[in-house]
Image (cartoon, rainbow, N blue to C red):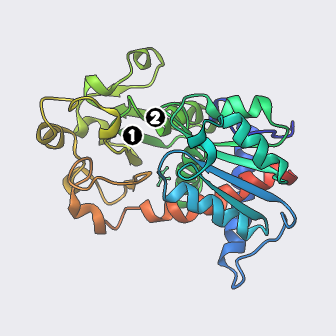
């Protein structure tokens, strides 16, 4: 298997690499169940976190993953940095590199920003979300959660519902599903389906009941109001009435996932907070193990 140099998108990963990352995550998940929760395989390494968009789960779990592996972590904050004086992103990264950094994790609103840095830096770059393009570690941890729950992925049906148009998570899943044998269904109002997606071979639904019926799992996406100029259908109330996932949609055997953050009352009914088939917080737990696997594979793999 060729050595993984960067993690920029699921599109670049082979099925073999994805399974290797799941297996590494299994080992780190076991480490995280031990009292010390440490596997100091990256002692002496330093990981820089460059987050230009807000984040709770991704940023903190990358930080925790690096620390659980014994690495040092540099947290760059755009606010208060010399970007305000006109310094470029590349100069910023090169200066951080000069301090002795072994890997960068970047989230940026610009599509392709992680690729831009990866072409210019001599160390691994991990894409933690680039605009509406890809969010590879989220798709890995979502599918890892299903793999842990069901014991396999091959042949499972996953329905993704919500703002497909602006979702980097959905795009990463489009690349991931065929590589691990998942059957993907997509559901959104027509205004939130990128037109080219109708030609990709995935079934697209505009009705929540039909999209969910018979699926093994459901991944509900956040309405990205900050990226939308107007409601996807006549009003937000209309959207919630027709596309919100409610308790009556789910059978006891269907697993509920959401990458977070959740807009309760918009894409998910508040009664689902306590749903027994929700694995939403498991996704967050598994995010640490998956990010440990990614850091380990890039720095020591
Ligand atoms: N799922 C996800 O990317 O969450 P954050 O924006 O909190 O990192």
Q: Is residue 152 above or below residue 92?
A: below
- Relative placement, left or right, of 191 versus 12 is left
Q: Residue 265, image x and y in percent?
A: 20, 54
Q: Quadrant of residue 194?
A: top left
In the rendered picture of this protein, how many numbered marks are placed on residues?
2
Q: Is mark 2 within 8 Å of ligand 1?
A: no
Q: Is residue 23 above or below residue 14?
A: below
At 20% from the left edge and 32% from the top edge, which residue is drawn? 231
Decide which of tag 1 and tag 2 comes sooner along the chain: 1
Q: Quadrant of residue 94?
A: top right
How crowded is the residue under tag 1: few (<14 C-alpha within 10 Å), some, or many (20+)?
Answer: many
Separation (CA) of disc 1 from disc 2:
6 Å
211 and 21: which one is in front? 21
Q: Is residue 124 above or below residue 174?
A: below
Q: Residue furthest front?
A: 85
28 and 85: which one is in front? 85
- For the question of whether residue 20 can be seen, the reply is yes
At 75% from the left edge and 54% from the top edge, which residue is drawn? 295
Considering the numbered disc 2 on the image, is that residue within a helix, a strand or a loop?
strand
94 and 158: which one is in front? 94
Please name the residue that numbered disc 2 is placed on. 184
At 81% from the left edge and 40% from the top edge, which residue is drawn? 4
Q: Residue 229, image x and y in percent?
A: 26, 29
- Relative placement, left or right, of 269 versus 205 is left
How crowded is the residue under tag 2: few (<14 C-alpha within 10 Å), some, or many (20+)?
Answer: many
* Marks 1 and 2 in Cβ contact (< 8 Å): yes
Please name the residue that numbered disc 1 is placed on. 159
């Amino acid at each position: 298997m060729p050595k993984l140099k960067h993690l920029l998108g699921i599109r670049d990963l082979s099925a073999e690499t994805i399974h290797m990352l799941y297996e590494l995550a299994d080992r780190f998940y076991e480490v995280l169940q031990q009292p010390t929760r440490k596997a100091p395989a990256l002692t002496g390494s330093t990981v820089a976190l460059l987050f230009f968009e807000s984040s709770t789960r991704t940023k903190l779990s990358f930080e925790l993953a690096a620390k659980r592996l014994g690495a040092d972590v540099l947290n760059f904050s755009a606010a208060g940095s010399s970007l305000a004086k006109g310094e470029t992103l590349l100069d910023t990264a090169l200066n951080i590199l000069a301090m002795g950094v072994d890997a960068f994790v970047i989230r940026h609103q610009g599509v392709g920003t992680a690729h831009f840095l990866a072409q210019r830096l001599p160390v691994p770059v991990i894409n933690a979300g680039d605009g509406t393009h890809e969010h590879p570690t989220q798709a890995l941890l979502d599918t890892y959660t299903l793999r842990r729950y069901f014991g396999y992925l091959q042949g499972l049906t996953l329905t993704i519902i919500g703002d497909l148009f602006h979702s980097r998570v959905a795009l990463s899943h489009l690349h991931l599903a065929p590589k691990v044998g998942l059957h993907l269904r997509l559901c959104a109002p027509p205004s939130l389906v990128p037109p080219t997606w109708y030609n990709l071979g995935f079934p697209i639904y505009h009705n929540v009941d039909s999209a969910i019926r018979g699926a093994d799992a459901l991944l509900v996406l956040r309405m990205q109001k900050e990226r939308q100029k107007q409601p996807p259908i006549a009003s937000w109330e209309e959207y919630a009435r027709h596309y919100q996932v409610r308790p009556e949609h789910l059978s006891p055997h269907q697993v509920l996932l959401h990458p977070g953050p959740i807009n309760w009352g918009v894409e998910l009914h508040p009664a689902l907070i306590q749903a027994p088939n929700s694995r939403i917080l498991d996704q967050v737990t598994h995010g640490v193990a998956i990010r440990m696997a990614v850091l380990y594979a890039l720095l020591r793999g």
